[in-house]
Image (cartoon, helix red, strand yellow):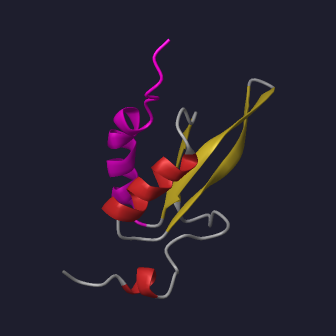
Amino acid sequence: MQINPLNLFDLRIVEHCPPHFFAVDFDCKVQAKRISDWIYEHLHGRYYLGDALLIKQGRQTICKRAAFEIHSEASYFAMVLPELNQSSLVF
């Protein structure tokens, strides 16, 4: 088991979304901590997790944005997201 230097120096999570990060926007149906914990445990590169303002057809919506420095990690996250973002509440 290797220690990730980004974890050691607390550099994995960035405070703003750099333009070279690949972003995945989604409607969050679970607590953001669940998403953040999954990213921290399963991926290795730097990432951003926060809110994003999207403008589509003149309408503004706020959604969650997860952005990754390693683009393959964004692809992996996007594939796992539908299962990860399921609410356990049943109505």
In magenta segment, residue 37:
no
Closer to the camera in the image, 81 or 29: 29
Q: Position of residue 73 (x, y in %)?
A: 36, 58
Left or right, residue 60 beside residue 72: right
Q: Classify the position of the N terminus by image quarter.
A: bottom left
Q: Identify which residue is drawn at 38% across, 49% down.
A: 77
Q: Assign the magenta stretch its main secondary structure.
A: helix
Region of the chain picked out in magenta, as a range: 70-91
Q: Identify which residue is drawn at 60% across, 71% down.
A: 14
Q: Identify which residue is drawn at 23% across, 83% down.
A: 2
Q: Identify which residue is drawn at 33% across, 58% down.
A: 72
Identify whether 57 is placed above or below 20. above
Closer to the camera in the image, 13 or 72: 13
Identify whether 6 is placed above or below 35. below
Q: Position of residue 24 (x, y in %)?
A: 51, 46
Q: Quadrant of residue 39?
A: bottom left
